[in-house]
Amino acid sequence: MINEGMLIGERYEILGLIGSGGMADVYKARDSKLNRLVAVKVLRQEFRMDKTFVSKFQKEAQAAAGLSHPNIVSVYDVGEDENANFIVMELVEGITLKDYIKRKKKLSVREATSIAIQVSLGLEAAHKCGLVHRDVKPQNIMISTDGKVKLSDFGIARAASSNTISSNVMGSVHYSSPEQVRGGFANAQSDIYSLGITLYEMVTGRVPFDGDTSVAIAIKHLQEEIIPPNKYVPDLPYSLNQIILKCTQKSVDRRYASMADLIMDLKRSLVDPNGNFVELAPLSSHAQTIMLSKAEMEAIQAASGSRYEDDDDDDEDDDEEEERPRRRRSSRYDEDDDDEDDEDEGGISGALEKAMTIGGFIIGAIIIVLLVVFICKAAGLFGNSSKPESSSVVPSSSSVVAQSSQVEDTGKVTVPDITGKTVSEAQEILNKLQLGIAKGGEAASDTVAEGLIISQDLMEGTTVATHSTVYYVISTGVADITVPDVTGKSQTVAETTLKSSGLETKITQENSDTVPIGDVIRTNPKAGTEVSTGSTVEVVVSLGKEDTQVEVPNVYGVSENTAKKTLTNLNLTVVVDTGTSTKVKAGEVMAQSIKAGTKVDQKTEITITVNSGADTTQDPDTAGDATVTPGEEDEDDEQQEAKVWACNQRLDTPPNYSGGPVKLTLSQVVDGQTVEKTVVENESPEFPLTFSTEGAEGVSVGTVYVYEKIDGEYKKIAKYTVPFEEY
């Protein structure tokens, strides 16, 4: 039993339960060594008892720990103690895609496409490392509070697929590929199928196959055709509809060959929503059994005429070859029956059959002799040394012949490099290897000339089956790109739009009174500007409205001028009234209309009451001291101006502090202008932290901002309002 406050692995302090799944419970915990928050996934008791599963789980989790990608939840550690087998992961503050879909019913096309692209990028990185997820579904996709999409559970999914586990543990069968349902081998195309089902649910709000039991749903995956998503969403772009259908094909070879192909089409769908660029492979007609009626057979024979008669012998030989295995398998036919069948169907005598056999041997021998002569001549064995030009060309032909024979023998071929070549050159090279070629898109390039191939989807050296298709991207030459207008759009959509246009992005943040938090305020360069391919565009994202309220300082006992200056610097409207008091000196503030420490809006009116000194009773013994000469008054003013305004404040630990280096800045309003300075930069601070610094003269309040270094950059995590006193 895992309880709050328990220490797992002598390192991870459990802070609370985040959620539960079919295989594990997830807890929020603090890493006591690195002083950071993490997520700890603890396997359920029934899996801990299976030593084989635990061993595989640990190995696969360790393999998943080697993955490092922005769209994959990082795995930090895996281990076990007397209470649990656990895996330590990055803590993602946010919700699952499943919960997000439930909240919004269905997602917009751009939002769904953006999420699919980010998941695909994570899967692509995993596939390149040889890891297949096997359990892609909305429940395993996290959306963080800053809009980032992360895929989780690589280690658990892979380990679980290696064992016999019931479907209710493995997760919903709604997203399983046909090959997984039938217990076959799962590969990268299985992840593509599951992602297609997930994308289907994002745009329609429903899964394509549903039923009362897991078995019923599994059968639908195997037997039923998917209902196109545009039946439920009529305004769904044509290209995205086709992408989903291609991802969810029953046959593995009819889906996308790789995540790179899928990502390319998803990005293109954002630019060309109704484009007809998704190629769905047709079902082969020869793969189906076609029954011909007797009338159809007679019609074919009649149309063939005398040529049919001439070819009759060959056809009968073929029929005879097809019939022989069946005769051998059947015990009802004896040798006499075989002879009778041969005579009825072929009409060929024994002598004629022998003659044809001998003729076949003779023709075969002639072909072999010609082939030997051709090869010897190509090798220069027949005295062709006087023609070096011919001998230099012919060996390449012979190598093609040898390579072709190798292709025929193995059915596999190694993909060559076609980058930097024209389409016609690439087509000639690939066709010799029995490979197809197709255009996968266009892109501008500063290094590859216009009309030459920039990249190919199947990398050089990859072994593929013959008749596979290599998709290429052709260069359009050096071209300027117009920065698209993404103002007012979410950060995720803006990044996707800019990157799909061939631009890089840099995210900065600032407050805005008009633009909602998380949306783009502007870009730099601005929309419509012509830039070169690969240029970096700064995307300024809104942090929402800034907290414009100020905390009223305590000006009691302060001189009138100093109090007015302090309050005015905070952008407060000051009204001065007079009164009498024996508690403060003449000219000092004896009361204020708004209590110190109260937060008010800027421009708020505050009345200060200044002691006029008219009725102040003086001690006779000190009456003479009250008389101050003009020179002495000037000296006192100079001494007062020489005093220092300082702060000495204790700062508690920020609630979202994760233990990294911090920077503290002080912000004060001086003469209507905000002045900010860095006060502390500490690589290893210890909270509660004592904050001591001098401030601006006459300013009795300031704001301390706390920044933590995360991923190499300082990010604001907290702010404190602190008082300053005159010393």
Image: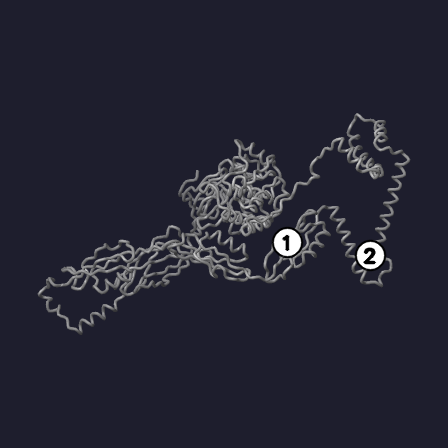
For the view shown, which residue lies furthest in the left direction? 620
Q: Comparing marks 2 and 1, which lies closer to the viewer?
A: 1
The residue that disc 1 covers is 472
How many dots with numbers?
2
* Quadrant containing the N terminus in the rendered view: top left
Whether residue 56 is visible, yes or no, is no
- Mark 2: few/some/many CA within 10 Å (<14, 14-19, 20+): many
* Location of residue 383 in the rendering, given as x and y in whole percent from the top left corner: 87, 60
* Marked residue nearer the N-terminal end (2 or 1): 2
* Location of residue 471 in the rendering, given as x and y in whole percent from the top left corner: 64, 51
Whether residue 597 is visible, yes or no, is yes
Towards the viewer: 76 or 460: 460
Q: Is residue 420 left or right of residue 648?
A: right
Q: Quarter of the image holding residue 389?
A: bottom right
Towards the viewer: 6 or 534: 534
Q: Is residue 564 left or right of residue 178?
A: left
For the view shown, which residue lies furthest in the top direction? 332
* Location of residue 117 in the rendering, given as x and y in whole percent from the top left corner: 53, 49
The amino acid at mark 2 is: Ala
* Quadrant containing the C terminus in the rendered view: bottom left
Identify the secondary structure beneath mark 1. Answer: strand
The amino acid at mark 1 is: Tyr
* Location of residue 122 in the rendering, given as x and y in whole percent from the top left corner: 54, 49
Q: Residue at x 85, y 48 (%)?
A: 368
Identify the secondary structure beneath mark 2. Answer: helix
Quick check: 704 above or below 319? below
Residue 378 marker: 2
Q: Residue at x 77, y 57 (%)?
A: 396
- Mark 1: few/some/many CA within 10 Å (<14, 14-19, 20+): many
Towards the viewer: 546 or 679: 546
Distance between mark 2 and mark 1 Cα atoms: 34 Å
